[in-house]
């Protein structure tokens, strides 16, 4: 039966005998047309849908006679734009778009949108690796969060703790936590880099072949093969976050009350079996949430029947509709679900690409071994890295990485004094020691890493911002103290020596100076070469030179307060507080960002007034809805790395409106 490509009412639904058309068999095999049984189901659904829509039109246009409604007296008007895809925050929401989609004209494949989302997620993965190496507070937070979601934290069915949580064996648990932190960070970057490169190629190919794409014809071979490879890569990529979900969801603090471990048969094994806690049953919303989460990672047949996009859509709908459901999902689990949701949206977009979407899975099955080999080659030699991080050498890095004893205390919000500077430098030195040890293990056991995105980020001369030694300000100049303290951030060191042709060596341990120095020269000649131990930041990552002209953007006082916290200077701004999430959204929107809430906790910000198109992702704080200062400071650093923003100068003005009236609550923010 002909449904695709019909050019008239008579052709639509036309039955064709197998022997009357030479392409009939091929059309069915490639699913460009339908067998009569399947086509009948389509027609039955369309009949009910069209009848409903016609009834709606009759009621809306009730003053027009039925026989005149489709006559020449009432020509077809252009379709109006119905913009309702916003939620209570007044920003676009993917969940609202999904809920409204069945009531709108079917959407088409939007590869550019996918490219934007995947690029932002890939850059977020880079920033995550960067922050783990640069920010002691972030590293400590991520370590504790990962440890808090380990299944070892569950009591067993007898109420006893896991042996590895006891002091005599705790180093084994630390090693597993650090192992997952490093491997997941590196793998996420590699996977989302692959997906971004693939969808970027698809955007180019779609533009190249746009005049040759016809629903009644096969897609150009090159374009079709790229689509099929992208679909296979998405299917493989989602396995990572789903595996993480399987480990983390049941052990997460909000869900821990429902589960218990079976006592291990061997106290030294890392294998664990989780079961329902005796006497505790799921009911109501709890049962719905757990059913959907287990469908994602445990019920492979159920996931095959429903499809990943539908399962993710329903989980997001439930979390937004039921506060109790949202409370069951920790911030860490929400981030994992965000990754699943990004991949699910890519799969949903491919499903919209009819009539060719139906044959993509068939082509994958016909060439399954080829695609598996291709994916393995693209993913890189992570098996070698996996094995390297299981070596005994890695246990020493884990011992250094566990955050007890205040070794990563990072009081960056305090006014600069010798004591606070020493605390900052001690935490930075401790973190550098951890990564030096990890890099030593990697260098020793991993030999084939050049084709990975991790190699790309670690092999370039990117720099970490480090606190310089305390310099006693000159009392003769009242401004000297502030200038000197600003220079505390001027010391940089390489992100990693691993791939820079230098042997990964442990940094020297921090030793506070007994006597303070007096600084004579606060700024060096920019033409002079860097001294030993310092690195010159690349142009896209270093702070802007003093003579550079930075763009000036108009913001109101509410946004100004947010940016002063994001780009906090303890010598200028008073003690920072929490930033309400809605205030952060307002500040970003005021500088021209298009904002879309994706699934889970992730929001996508796309610039519209800057000279770059690169988007950025931020996670909404869960569950309190306010950004802590340390997190805000990291957001500021990410904005600096991505857009070159530094927020060093704010000039408060009173802009004039169109009537010439003064608006006293606006400021101009110069980045």
Image (spheres, rainbow, N blue to C red):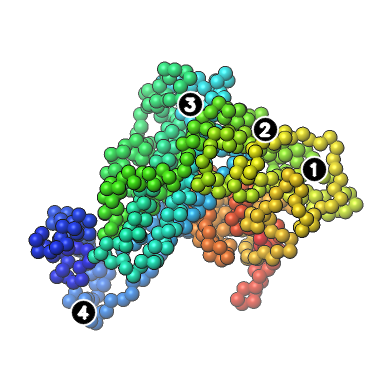
Disc 4 versus disc 1: distance between alpha carbons?
Answer: 84 Å
Depth check: give the residue in front, 414 or 547: 547
Q: Residues at badges 4 and 2 in contact (C-beta under 8 Å)? A: no
Q: Which residue is mark 4?
A: 71
Labels 4 & 3 near each other (Cβ < 8 A)? no
Pinpoint residue 238: horizontal percent, then vertical percent: 40, 44
Residue at left 34%, top 46%?
A: 370
- Relative placement, left or right, of 184 versus 106 is right
- Determine whether, in the image, residue 53 is placed left or right of residue 406: left
- Quadrant assignment for the C terminus: bottom right
> Is there any visible trace of residue 652 in the rendered image?
no
- Circle 3: is it few (<14), some (14-19), or many (20+) Cα within 10 Å? many
Instruction: Return the residue nearer the eye: 83 or 520.
Output: 520
Q: Earlier in the sequence, mark 4 or mark 1?
A: 4
Left or right of residue 442: residue 260: left
Query: Which numbered circle lies on residue 407?
Result: 2
Q: Which mark is residue 470?
A: 1
Callout in the foreground (4, 2)? 2
Residue denoted by label 3: 152
Disc 2 to disc 3, C-alpha distance: 24 Å
């Amino acid at each position: 039966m002909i449904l695709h490509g019909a050019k008239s009412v008579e052709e639509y639904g036309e039955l064709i005998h197998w022997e009357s058309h030479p392409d009939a068999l091929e059309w069915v095999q490639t699913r460009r047309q339908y067998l009569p049984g399947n086509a009948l189901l389509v027609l039955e659904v369309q009949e009910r849908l069209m009848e409903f829509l016609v009834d709606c039109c009759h009621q809306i246009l009730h003053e027009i006679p039925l026989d005149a409604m489709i006559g020449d007296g009432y020509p077809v008007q252009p379709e109006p734009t119905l913009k309702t895809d916003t939620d209570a925050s007044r920003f676009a929401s993917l969940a609202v778009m999904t809920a409204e989609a069945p009531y709108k004209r079917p959407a088409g494949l939007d590869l550019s949108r996918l490219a934007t989302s995947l690029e932002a997620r890939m850059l977020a993965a880079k920033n995550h690796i960067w922050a783990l190496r640069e920010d002691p507070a972030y590293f400590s937070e991520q370590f504790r969060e990962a440890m808090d979601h380990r299944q070892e934290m569950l009591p067993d069915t007898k109420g006893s703790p896991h042996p590895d949580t006891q002091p005599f064996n705790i180093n084994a648990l630390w090693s597993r936590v650090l192992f997952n932190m490093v491997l997941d960070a590196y793998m996420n970057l590699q996977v989302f880099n692959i997906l971004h490169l693939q969808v970027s190629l698809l955007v180019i190919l779609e533009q190249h072949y746009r005049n040759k794409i016809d629903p009644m014809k096969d897609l150009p071979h090159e374009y079709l093969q790229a689509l099929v490879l992208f679909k296979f890569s998405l299917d493989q990529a989602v396995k990572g976050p789903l595996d993480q979900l399987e480990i983390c969801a049941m052990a997460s603090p909000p869900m821990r009350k429902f589960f218990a471990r079976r006592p291990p048969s061997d106290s030294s094994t890392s294998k664990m079996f989780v079961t329902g806690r005796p006497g505790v049953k799921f009911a109501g919303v709890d049962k719905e949430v757990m059913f959907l989460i287990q469908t994602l990672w445990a019920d492979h047949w159920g996931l095959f029947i429903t499809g990943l996009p539908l399962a993710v859509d329903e989980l997001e709908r439930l979390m937004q509709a039921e506060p109790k459901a949202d409370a069951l999902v920790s911030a860490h689990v929400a981030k994992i679900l965000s990754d699943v949701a990004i991949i699910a949206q890519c799969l949903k977009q491919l499903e919209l690409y009819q009539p060719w979407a139906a044959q993509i899975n068939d082509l994958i099955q016909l060439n399954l071994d080829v695609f598996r080999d291709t994916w393995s080659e693209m993913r890189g030699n992570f098996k070698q890295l996996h094995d390297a991080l299981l070596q005994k050498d890695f246990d020493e890095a884990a011992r250094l990485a566990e955050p007890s004893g205040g070794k990563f205390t990072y009081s960056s919000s305090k006014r600069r004094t010798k004591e606070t500077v020493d605390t900052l430098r001690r935490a930075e030195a401790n973190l550098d020691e951890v990564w030096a040890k990890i890099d030593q293990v990697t260098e020793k056991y991993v030999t084939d890493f050049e084709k990975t995105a991790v190699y790309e980020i670690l092999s370039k001369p990117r720099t970490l911002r480090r606190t310089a030694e305390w310099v006693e300000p000159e009392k003769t100049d009242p401004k000297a103290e502030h200038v000197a303290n600003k220079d505390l951030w001027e010391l940089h060191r390489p992100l990693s020596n691993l791939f820079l042709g230098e042997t990964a060596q442990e940094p020297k341990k921090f030793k506070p100076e007994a006597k303070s120095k007096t600084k004579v020269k606060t700024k060096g000649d920019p033409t002079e070469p860097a001294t030993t131990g310092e690195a010159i930041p690349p142009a896209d990552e270093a702070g802007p030179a003093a003579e550079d002209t930075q763009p000036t953007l108009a913001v109101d006082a509410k946004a100004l307060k947010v940016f002063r916290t994001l780009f906090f200077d303890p010598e200028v701004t008073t003690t920072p507080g929490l930033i309400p999430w809605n205030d952060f959204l307002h500040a970003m929107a005021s500088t021209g960002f298009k904002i879309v809430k994706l699934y889970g906790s992730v929001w996508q910000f796309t610039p519209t007034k800057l000279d770059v198109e690169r988007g950025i992702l931020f996670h909404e704080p869960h569950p309190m809805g306010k950004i802590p200062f340390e997190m805000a400071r990291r957001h500021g650093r990410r904005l600096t790395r991505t857009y070159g923003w530094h927020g060093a100068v704010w000039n408060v003005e009173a802009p004039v409106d169109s009537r010439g009236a003064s608006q006293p609550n606006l400021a101009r923010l110069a980045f």
